[in-house]
Amino acid sequence: MFYSPVPMSEPKANPFQRNLTLFIAFRVLFSARFYYPVLGVLFLDLGLTLEQYAILNAAWAATIIVFEIPSGALADVIGRRRMVVAAGALMVLEIAIFAFAPTGPLLFWLLLLNRIVSGAAEACASGADEALAYDSLPEENRDVEWPKVLARLVRWSSASFFIAMILGAAAFDANIVNSLTSTLGLPFRWTSAETVRWPVYLTLATAVLAAGCACLLREPSGHRSGSRHPIRGVLANVAQASRFVFSTRKILLLLLAGVLFDSTIRLFLTFASNYYRLIELPAFVNGMLGSAFAVLGFLAASLARRLATNVPPAQVAALLAGLLLSALIGLCAATPIWGAWVLIPLGLVMPMTQFFLSNYLNAWTSSELRATVLSFRGMALNVGYGLAGIGFASGTAFLRSRSPGLENDALFGQTLFFLPGAFLFGALALAGFAWLTRPSITQP
């Protein structure tokens, strides 16, 4: 009788590995909006007024807020893949409306429809794609593999944002397009009226690719993909997720910290061009600075992954708060030219905040509620950003009433002093809440 050693079992292949690549591709293509660097002037060049542009933005934000949580709950009930496919289809529809809406009296109403469809697409994708990707990982090593997936996502998203900023702005500018055609020896000449929607056409191409990636996704095994009573299931999931979020201390603290960091940085980005002008930077560098902001995501991905595996969440929050506060104090100085240094900490904190929100929420939430809870994140961040905008506008109105003759640039410089004070107050309030709730920790 011969001895026959038992062969060592090889690691079992993950049948849903392709979902992870498709998730990254979908998220990158879905967010690669080539018209973002010229969005405001694009709407105005099409013939809209500033007031109409403001209405369109408000409609977009309101749609996301209304559909965010219900869409996440629906994803947990009928299946995440279905919601991601719906998001891809809605993106194709919204960009097609934007690309081919005729100028004239119907333009505003068609673009209003575009903004509503766009908000619905954002809501459908928010949470569903991430929950599907997380559940596609083997349960035994999700805590190790998910940060790697997020790091890849941050890097690819940063690269796509960089390309979209550069290529979108170039495609919009008829002078750049004509210079390129001349260099290539082509006989074509274009006017600004003809190139105004070229960034939108580029986005339509990526929308079709994003929809294709969504269709190739597979629902992870073990997750329900249908329900006899979806409305009842949605309501039950929303109620259960609400109880979970508001009764689980670490989830609630994580969302509050995310709102504080995210809304502060997004508020600055809204007025970034005003800050660049305040520190005497020429207008042509705006696109370059936006691209540099995106490149910082590559460094942020590596830092966030190391911190996630070696540093407790509370210390991570303290580190990010210190970085962000230093940038906000630097904003107040408004140092000519050199004041652009604040982009470095801001460009690191923004993607790292998104990384940690995704990492911890997925790890701390059960599969049956994952997409719903992730939608609470989207809802919280958008509401927080809206409240931050209202607060900033109120502070600006107060300063204007105190100094009615102050010019806009000088007024903006004074409003910057509100930011570090408001952030420090919020951070101290959050720390106080964390300290007061220590005896009542509820594990998920």
Image: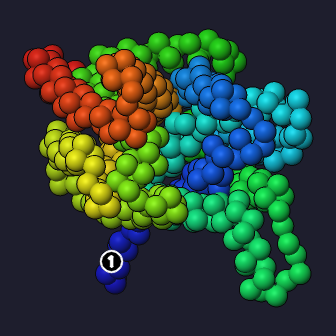
- In the displayed structure, 233 sits above or below 192; it is above
Q: Nearer the viewer, residue 336 or 243?
A: 336
Q: Is residue 302 toward the left or the right of residue 72 in the image?
A: left
Task: Name the colour scheme.
Answer: rainbow
In which quarter of the view is residue 255 placed? top left
Q: Residue at 78% across / 58% down in the picture?
A: 192
- Is residue 366 visible in the rendered image? The answer is no
Q: Is residue 341 positioned above or below 54 on the image?
A: below
Q: Is residue 105 visible?
A: yes
Question: Image quadrant for the C terminus?
Answer: top left
Residue 185: x %, y % from top left: 82, 88
Q: What residue is at 41 percent from the left and 59 percent from the top?
A: 281
Q: Where does the image place residue 22, in percent across and percent down from the top left?
A: 60, 57
Q: Quadrant of the image for the N terminus?
A: bottom left
Residue under numbered circle 1: 5
**Residue 32 percent coordinates (x, y):** 61, 55
Q: Locate residue 122 relative to residue 353 in the image: left or right.
A: right
Q: SS class of the residue under badge 1?
A: loop
Q: Amino acid at mark 1?
A: Pro
Judged left or right of residue 290, residue 436 is: left
Q: Residue furthest front?
A: 405
Q: Looking at this view, is 411 or 35 the one in front?
A: 411
Q: Residues within 10 Å of mark 1 (few under 14, many from 20)?
A: few
- Image point (78%, 83%), residue name: 182
Q: Position of residue 113 (x, y in %)?
A: 77, 29
Name the residue located 84 percent from the left edge and 34 percent from the top edge: 107
User: How many numbered marks are there?
Assistant: 1
